[in-house]
Image (cartoon, rainbow, N blue to C red):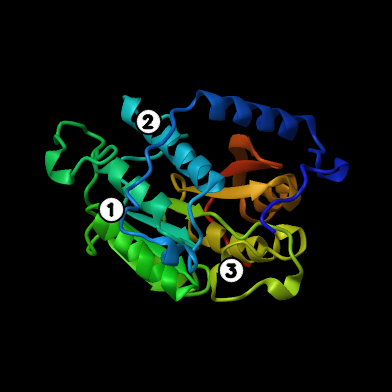
Amino acid sequence: AEHHPLRTADQEPKTAEFASLNAAAERRAKECRSAVMPSLKHLNFRDYDRVYEPSDDTYLLIDAIGYDVDAMEQSEGDDGTMLHSNMLQTIEIGCGTGTPTVYLAKRIRGIRGDEKESSVEESSSHTNKNCVHYVTDINPDAIRIAKATAESNGISTEHFQALQCDLASQLIEKMEGKVDVLIFNPPYVPTPDEEVGSSGIEASWAGGSNGRVVIDRALPQIARLLAFPNGVAYMVTVDDNYPEQISQTMDELYGIKVIPWLRRRAHNEYLTIQRMTPTRPCQED
């Protein structure tokens, strides 16, 4: 049920510009270094009956985050397009195992692979141990498992907060316009609309019509949460989701620039990480 055909003719980019951005994203995905997954040794088969097991979309997502962290570490200054080493707050919507956020938390702390934080040298000017990472999920098992993933990888509860809620509903008022990095691997698989909205594992993939039901509900929240001008969001899409339409909507309604950042074929679908950055402060309608 999680696999579907490669894009149909009506899902092809309508503009040469977006087609070119897709091509650049494919090249970027081939050139980038493969990210090292956080340890998931604490999980067992029963856990994966309750929460989405990291797969190709997860790997592409952390590759995209790692690509930008690498650029941040190698930079001698801010060119206005990269992650900022002094980030203070991040959010992951629909965290599942918590893998992407734990990966980001480890990387900005200077931890690679299975290193422990105590073994990391403090020499890098980009090391950040002050950032607080928030994760949300409607599935209570995901909250439990994400907390365990953070703990198993040396990220303290002081810096990792998990909340059971619908999308980012419990964080909008508190964090509007303050989120430096937002991560979202949505339920993007096209399904009947009645399959959307469960609090079980199926909530991780059932996306409704065009796989857009949950995505379209999340887009206004993403726009409200991102900090201007340096906030960055990473969202997974497939071509069934009509990402060019998403790009146009975010630009027209919220001044959010959406660029295909990394793109890779996985089985019989194309996965793309859409990178979103605000061009102006969000003005709520």
Amino acid, disc 2: Asp
Image x and y of residue 147, in percent:
32, 65
Question: Callout 3: helix, strand or loop?
Answer: helix
For the N terminus, the quadrant is bottom right
Q: Element at badge 2?
A: helix
Using the image, tell me which numbered label, if any, was put on residue 131: 1
**Left or right of 171: which side holds 6?**
right
Left or right of residue 22, residue 39 in this image: left
Is residue 131 shown above or below 216? above
Q: Say which residue label 3 marks.
A: 203
Of labels 2 and 3, earlier in sequence is 2
Q: CA distance from mark 1 to mark 3?
A: 28 Å
Residues at circles 2 and 3 in contact by the CB criterion of under 8 Å: no
In percent of the image, x 55 and y 64: which residue is there? Answer: 221
Left/right placement of residue 181 relative to residue 249 reads left
Kindly tell me whether residue 178 is visible in this rendering: no
Mark 1 secondary-structure assignment:
loop
Counting from the top left corner in percent of width and height, residue 237 is at 64, 49
Find disc 2 in the rendering and name its residue. Answer: 70
Relative image position of residue 127 (x, y in whole percent)? 23, 39
- Calculate the distance from the C-alpha at mark 1 to the C-alpha at mark 2: 18 Å
